[in-house]
Image: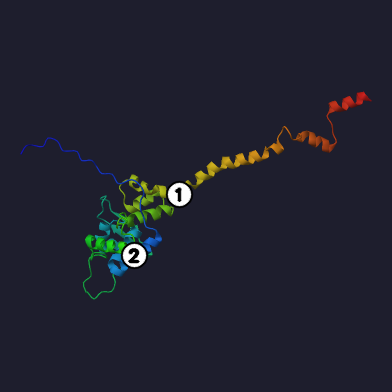
Amino acid sequence: MGDIHSLPEFRRQKERAGRIRFLERDEEARLFAALRSRSEDAYRLSVFLVDTGCRLGEALGLIWNDIQEHRVSFWITKSGRSRTIPMTERVKEVIKLPPTTEGRRPKGPFTKLTQAQYRAIWNEAKAEVGLGADEQVVPHILRHTCASRLVQGGIDIRRVQMWLGHQTLSMTMRYAHLATNDLDGCVVVLEKPRADEAQHSAENSVFASPLTAPSPVKTARKQSGTEPAKARRKSSKGK
């Protein structure tokens, strides 16, 4: 075989542009109920994923030493950077193992499940609640849902990056358009000139036009009974 003098080029596949699908609250409730009816472990894992925004592999790889009081640490991550985040109240509940007859404790809260098992249960549950035809409703949608809720709730994009463990801010910027509250001030600026123009137009309408309305100075003089000095002089000469 001959030597390879140059490596072939591989084009990096970019993430698909367009809408980022995330679960609404009612969709989450229906989907999680269907998951729970099939597997308590799958339900607990789903709650953990949507409230932490972690990747499926990160959650399945957790061991008990990674969980300390009110925080959870992810050491094996896609970006290669570890991170620690606080837990919500329901995450604290779902990491507790349900009562079992088996005496041996698993290595972590979700180590009983594999990715293949969880995805199979997920697909059955989403088909039951009418989401089977939606190709974007995959387990990773729970990460998108977490990110979307953080941004919509007013958390700044840098903190969202830290929460998700994104290596670059540009990855987190995909969710920035959801922070609509940051743009509310723009509407105020755009509406203000329009409001001023409307007020100015009303004040200078045809009924109050300088061409048709009497001079405010003349009106004031007439009401006070005073006349200019020049008019008084003409009046005295006439006498």
Label 1: few (<14), some or many (≥20) within 10 Å?
few
Farthest residue to the bottom: give it: 101
Question: Residue 60's spot in the image, x, y percent?
Answer: 25, 61
Left or right: 236, with 168 as reference point = right
| Mark 2 touches mark 1? (CB < 8 Å) | no
Q: Is residue 53 visible?
A: no
Residue at the spot of label 2 = 32
* Amino acid identity at mark 1: Thr
| Position of residue 196 in the picture relative to residue 93 (left or right) | right
Residue 48: x percent and y percent? 32, 62
120 or 146, nearer to the observer? 120
On residue 180, which mark appears?
A: 1
Residue 229 appears in view: yes
Q: Quadrant of residue 215?
A: top right
What coloring was used for the rendering? rainbow
Q: Position of residue 174 (x, y in %)?
A: 36, 47
* Residue found 69% across the figure and 37% down from its top: 206
Determine the residue positioned at 41% across, 52% down: 151
Image height of 230 relative to 204, above or below: above
Q: Secondary structure at mark 1?
A: helix
Sequence-first disc among 2 and 1: 2
Q: CA distance from mark 2 to mark 1?
A: 28 Å
> Which residue lies most toward the top here?
237
Tell me if mark 2 has few (under 14), some (14-19) or many (20+) residues whose alpha carbon lies within 10 angstroms of its own. many
Label drawn at residue 225: none
Outermost left residue = 1
- Residue at 83 percent of width and 36 percent of height: 222
Nearest the eye: 159 or 230: 230
Compare residues 15 and 136 and report the one nearer the observer: 136
Q: Amino acid at mark 2?
A: Phe
Give the residue at x 57% y 42%: 192
